[in-house]
Image: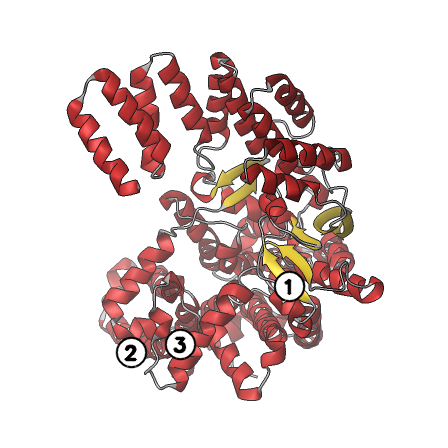
Amino acid sequence: MRREPESIVQIEASSQTSEQSWWKWVFVALVAIIFVVLPLMCLDAGNSRDEEPWHYPYSLRYYQYYTSLGQDTSYIDDTPMKFFGFAFDNVVTLIIKAFGFENNYMTVRHVCNALAGAFLMLFVGLLAKLLGGWRAGSLALLLIFFSPYILGHSLNNLKDIPLAACGIGAIYYIAWFIKEYPKPTLKTSLKMGVLLGAAIGIRPGGFLFFAYFGLFVLVYYLMVNKPRQYFSKSNIAILKKIFVQAAVASGAMLVVMFILWPYALRDPLHNIVDALKAMSNHPGAYSQVFEGKLLFSQDLPWYYCIKNICITSPIVVLMGGGVQLFAAHRQPKGWFWTFVLLFCFAFPIFWIAFTKAIVYGGWRHVMFVYPTLVVAAALGFNTLVNWAKNKKLKIVFTVLPVVLLFDPFIFTVKNHPYENLYFNRFVGGVKGAYGNYDLDVLDNSKREAAEWILADVAKNGAPDPTRKTLVATWHASDYYFRKDTDNFSINYVRWEKRNTADWDYAFYSIAGIYHLLLSKEAYPPKNTVHQVMVDGVPIALVLKREDRSSYYGRAALQQGNFAEAETQYIKALEYDAYDDEALADLVELYTRTGHYDSATRLVEHWQSFVKDGLALLNSMAYLYFYKKDFANALQTANTLTKLYPRHNIDGLWVAANVYEQQDNLGEAWRTLNEIITKQNHKPAYELMLNIANRMGDEDTVQQISERLKKLE
């Protein structure tokens, strides 16, 4: 056991009782259980969304770099992934290759990640113990283990969990560094530096923890000294020692960082700055379901991260953090340590909101902030126990956080391995979140769905024994079928385009399904043969092709055979009246052929189960326009652009055509300009050319004609 600094020994001298000794063994037992249970739990987890197509293949490029002693630099070829660091993935891939685990590489990845999650929890417990004793450390272990979001991601998230583990480990050694003031040790500095370098090697945002080091040491120095003593002779000597140890930590950090992140070593100043810029300005635009609305990442409200944390964390953790704010004055240097913990939690969230940085997929990109909140919560409850005057009240306050963990505990037991889908009572659990917030954004459920298909074919035989069984899904899932490639063929098709492809089975997680379709009437579809359930809510489904009419209808429509397409789509809707794809295509067919009454009847039926849906509003806008009902066409187009400002161009396009038909050429021109700023929309340029000709603007006609030639 490491010798603790004199200041800590003095603080805890009065509490080194048989009770504290008992809590020490509780702490040790909990750590042992976590390190055994987590690797076992991860064996049931599915692959996260990006593991198969991106993370593991990209780590192989780094493997080639290391094994070629730097000669193979394909890891930097035409990909932004070099900016984000792959340290943990790379280490795991080295293990996979060294021990010949290629056939089960995902299992190895998940076990290693589970161990990273265990270390994350260990550091949470150690930091709470350092600041509040063994009981606080034990409470922190319980709170972090039964935080389902963290627990679930510990099963298969090889980016955010290792970063959070290194981050809280670095904060733990920063606390040690401060506790050892005025004589921080070489051992502490080296350990802190190694963890700082590892954090940066995983994501360049790990530099934030180095900034924490400088900030907290400075604040502590200013706090324990009077202003007139800041630069006294004795304090100058102390500052020299601190700077020496800070230099040691910085050196260790840089060595580890450059080993784990070779892209930074190629041009340290330029490449690191570029990586930090790329991290702050992510180019992706990802759809999110938040508060019942479908939003792009760029349109999320400023409180997106903090609200997601508040509704997916155990309420007991939030309560404990609040208690710590009021109980800090009862702890040695309590205000300082509360500042450290809650600053680590709040500052990144504030900065994301302030800079409008791109986030998506819940709060996984700020997962590293949560461990310090858990430490604060454990210290808060621990202070309540210390505050109690009699034994019975002490027992009540000790048991209170454990009892309040009942809800996440039950959820974990009932819904493993989908722990990260947990929502607390603030939104009514998973049922309350259904259709209002994203569920299963990492597609963990696809493993159960794929295994169900394999079992069904093994039991009942292939739908067509003369060929491979065709399986459609959205994200990469070859891994699940890797042992039977002779009998299965995987095709990647988005949910809303599923009828464009031929398949025998299809499986999709809820994250790929338009949220307004999740009504009792329309979901699950009629050809659903299996559902993956969490707390009574279907988070994924398996479809089995019983009717191919919709597929044949799309093929006929694309060939211009409208009569055959109509026949097939009518059959498809007779089979499943809520087939949104068939409805969209048939409404388009009737609109294009002038059968407006038939299209209107279909739209009225469609509205009954997916009011204000994206595809529905698109179809309605075009239908009203072709009917020359310009008032309703414009109203619907404006609703489209208001509800879905980044999802499509159709609303703007219909509005521009309405304005042109009404001879409101100025408004038509403005709307068309808005379209072409978003994409090279050839019809928009053609309409602009027509308007310019009508206005007699020869210079503009020439400019637009040249642009159209470039688009051909």
Q: Where is 524 relative to 227, above or below? A: above
Q: Taking 233 as reference, is 472 left or right?
A: right
Circle number at residue 244: 2
Circle 2 Cα neighbour tier, 10 Å, few/some/many (<14 / 14–19 / ≥20): some
The label nearer to you, 2 versus 1, is: 1
Upstream in sequence: badge 2 or badge 1: 2
Q: Which mark is residue 530?
A: none
Disc 1 marks which amino acid?
Ser
Task: State how far apart marks 3 and 2 are (Cα).
Answer: 25 Å
Mark 1 Cα-neighbour bin, 10 Å: few <14, some 14–19, many ≥20: some
Q: Which residue is at 27% across, 74% downward?
A: 266
Q: Mark 1 near mark 3, Cβ–Cβ under 8 Å?
A: no
For badge 3, the amino acid type reads Leu
Q: Is the residue marked by circle 3 packed among few (<14), some (14-19), or many (20+) residues within 10 Å?
A: many
Can the viewer see residue 347?
Answer: yes
**Badge 1 is on which residue?**
489
Q: Earlier in the sequence, mark 3 or mark 2?
A: 2
Report helix, strand or loop for mark 2. helix
Q: Nearer the viewer, mark 1 or mark 3?
A: 1
Q: Nearer the viewer, residue 431 or 579?
A: 579
Q: Which residue is mark 3?
A: 260
